[in-house]
Image (cartoon, rainbow, N blue to C red):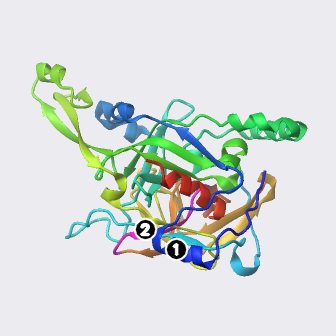
Amino acid sequence: MKRILPPLWGAAATAALLVSGTAVPAHAYEITVTTPLVSGEKAADVIAYWLGDGGRPLTAATPLSAPAGIQATPVAAEGGSPGGVRGVVPASAGVKRASGPSRNVNLPRTTGKVFFVGSDGRPHWCAGTSVQADHRNLVATAGHCVYATRSPAEGAAEGAAESAAEGAAAGAEDSAPAPYRYWIFIPGYAGGGTPWGVYVGARAFAHSDFTRYRDLDRDYAFVSVHAGLLPKRVTLRDAAHYAAFSAGPKYRTATGYTGVRLLPAGRLGDKVGGQGLAYNLPVDRPLAIFGYPMQTAEGHASGRSRLTRAYGKPFLAQDLSRRANELIAVRSAFTAASGSPWLAAYHGVRGLGYLNGLTIGLSGTGTGLSPYFDGELFQVYSAARRAG
């Protein structure tokens, strides 16, 4: 199902948006699906799962496979975009960067990995990034990194059923898939480290066309997260101290006992900042792509690679066999994992720009795909950014 929204904001409203991030006006129908994930009381239990056994679930997690079989072809479009009134939401900075040498110079602290337990019961990961929000608590990633995807056979069967039962489709609104379990975000993740803390997902926000139909044009999600917890490992002297330790996860090692204290890390945006967001922009200028490489021009890369940057000029693409006609594609030096952010007007010293795309899959080798960021995406984002 495709919907086309008419322009809703004039020049004055767009100017206000540039200054203050004014919320999107209400539409006549609701397209945002909101799904609860984990309550604040359960957040520590989720972190305990990931940090247990020396953090083995984190290091054992594998990258989630992107949707397969996307054959996107370039589209010539006058003006370089599908149209619509342009708008941006300004970025926000986090704590001041420490001076001195760093391996992450000119890389955004906002980007990291999201981890979750998949439908197969195993740990997986995608990329994600912190974005500006009223409560400084929001992560953007691909929709299929939050909700389980159906198989192609299930999708085909659903499409046939939809055509046969168009008049009874109202009840399908309530058939949104269950989200993945134990969803967390770790900004700056590398080699098992949690430099800025661990943030547990509280609520997910997605487009109804993605949750109902797996529409690739709407394969994005925003997740509000609880205040972070910063793990600090401590050595426990003996079995008695191990038994008495209750400040967080604990585990035995070959040489003794270890406990993990969970210290308050504060709000995500206060710690690492939040990228801005831009929508309805012309597709005519390079974007900075940040992600964990799954493949490079020289061959496959390890899923544990560090955050990497590339630049590419996007172009419009579509795959009508998948009912995807509002994609953008970019060829870059590496293939980024699902959920990797594409940033416009990126400023390396500040580590901030405007989120204007995110990787949802590949077309062939070396060409990443993203939904085009339009007014409908902004409506979903607006609902998420207000969540407490």
Residue 372 visible in the shown view:
no
Quick one: which residue is furthest to the left in this view?
237
- 69 relative to 360 in the view: left or right: right
Examine the structure image and report whether residue 311 is included in the region drawn in magenta. Answer: no
Is 350 one of the magenta-colored residues? Answer: yes
What range of the chain is rendered magenta?
349-360
* Secondary structure beneath label 1: helix
Q: Secondary structure at mark 2?
A: loop
Relative image position of residue 347 (x, y in whole percent): 40, 76
Whole-percent x, y for residue 83 in the image? 71, 73
Please tell me which residue is depicted at 59% across the width and 61% down the height of the picture. 378
Residue type for callout 1: Ala
| Residue at x 55% of width, y 43% of height | 146
Name the side, left or right, on which 51 lies relative to 181. Answer: left
Residue 204 drawn at (x, y percent):
53, 44
- Distance between the Cα atoms at labels 1 and 2? 15 Å
Residue 58 vs residue 245, the one in the foreground: 245
Residue 102 appears in the figure: yes
Position above or below: 353 against 184: below
- Viewer-proximal residue, 18 or 112? 18
Q: Closer to the camera: disc 1 or disc 2? A: 1
Identify the amino acid type marked 2.
Answer: Ala
**Quadrant in the rendering for residue 161:** top right
Q: Looking at the rendering, which quadrant does residue 47 occupy?
A: top left
- Give me the residue at 59% from left, 46% from top: 144
Q: Which residue is mark 2?
A: 91
Question: On residue 168, which mark appears?
Answer: none
Q: Earlier in the sequence, mark 1 or mark 2?
A: 1
Q: Which mark is residue 16?
A: 1
- At label 1, counting other C-alpha atoms closer than 10 Å, the crowd grade (few under 14, some 14-19, many 20 or more) is few
The picture places residue 337, in percent across and down from the top left corner, at 52, 54
